[in-house]
Amino acid sequence: MILVETPCPAGDAPMPSDRSRNATGIDPALASRLYRKAAVPAEWQLTEERFRQALETSVAHRFRGASPSADEVERYLETLRLEDLALACACAEGNEPAWEKFVADFRPELYRAGRAIAGESRGRELADSLYADLYGLEERENKRRSLLRYFYGRSRLTTWLRAVMAQRHVDELRRGKRTEPLEDGAGDLPRGGGAAPEPDPDRVRYLALLQAALTEALAGLEPRDRLRLASYYIEELTLAQIGRMLGEHEATVSRKLDRTRLEVRRCLESSLREKKRLSDAQVKLCYEYAREEWPFDLTGVLSARE
């Protein structure tokens, strides 16, 4: 039976501390043997000391609150996916060759998992949005804050990545349900058959308001942000292709796309509520109508270059 680690969201829990890493000592000879067994490529620049710290973090997480014997620790360490753990450590340290290896080996799996979890279009976006957190752009106390530091080697890295994506998708759905407004009269709807509801005569007006608000939100973006959106959604370029075009790392592209999507959504909803005077229920209708019928062509609005 494969043990699947529970992924820890990057922003919701502290990074593994020096105290937790040193809580369970590992025999140096055993650590050296496992390091050799992991077959760490020299270009990853992953030291034996750093790998030993990762092993100790994994042991501390596995035997949390217990005092395992040396034999128990050794048996546990022998079950770890050492090559995957080494790759995760090197990527978390920001090593470019290791990151290139990660992208080459795991990008297809991430896209497959994304499609299986969230469908074709949203699945690709879900996978791409994960790169920035995996790469770890933010630094605290001179340490990269990478989601890969929460991989302890107990399962295959692909299994762990699928679990992370699935959890993120579930979290998004839960957030959506918490913010979804309860429409007036919802409890009075008939449970059985009956006549289908009349089409909303305001559908055209709602779509027009949404189009105007979205056009305004997109027009207010910096040209470089519009270019990223156009490259990703219209030209369907990969993060790596966009990064080469703009001279940015693909994790940076992922992070900036996320930031831009959030900014567009914030401006869009602000315009609909404050300028167009729509209620929460009416804003929800705008989105529902857009999903059913979306006549808006994004090409013209996003075609502006720097």
Image (tube, grey):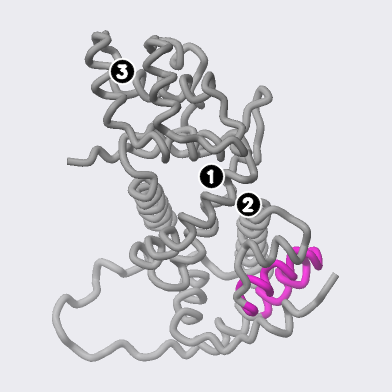
Q: Is residue 226 left or right of residue 294?
A: right
Q: Is residue 33 left or right of residue 269?
A: left
In terms of image quadrants, where is residue 296?
bottom right
Whether label 1 touches label 2, CB < 8 Å: yes
Q: Secondary structure at mark 1?
A: helix
Q: Is residue 127 above or below residue 157?
A: below
Q: Is residue 209 left or right of residue 55?
A: right
Magenta extent: 212-235
Q: Is residue 282 above or below residue 140?
A: below
User: Residue placed at 45% from the left, 76% from the top?
Assistant: 288
Q: Is residue 221 left or right of residue 229?
A: right
User: Residue placed at 24% from the left, 9% from the top?
Assistant: 69
Disc 2 crowd rating (10 Å Cα; few below 14, some 14-19, many 20+) is many
Check the image and name the residue furthest to the left: 192
Residue 56 screen position, x and y as percent: 41, 19
Q: Secondary structure at mark 3?
A: loop
166 or 262: nearer the eye?
166
Label 3 sits on what residue type?
Arg
The residue to which callout 1 is attached is 134
Check the image and name the residue furthest to the right: 306
Give the position of the C terminus as an image quadrant: bottom right
Label 2 sits on what residue type?
Ala
The residue to which callout 2 is attached is 251
Disc 1 crowd rating (10 Å Cα; few below 14, some 14-19, many 20+) is many
Tell me if residue 211 is in the magenta stretch: no
Disc 3 crowd rating (10 Å Cα; few below 14, some 14-19, many 20+) is few
Residue 129 screen position, x and y as percent: 54, 56
Residue 64: image tag: 3
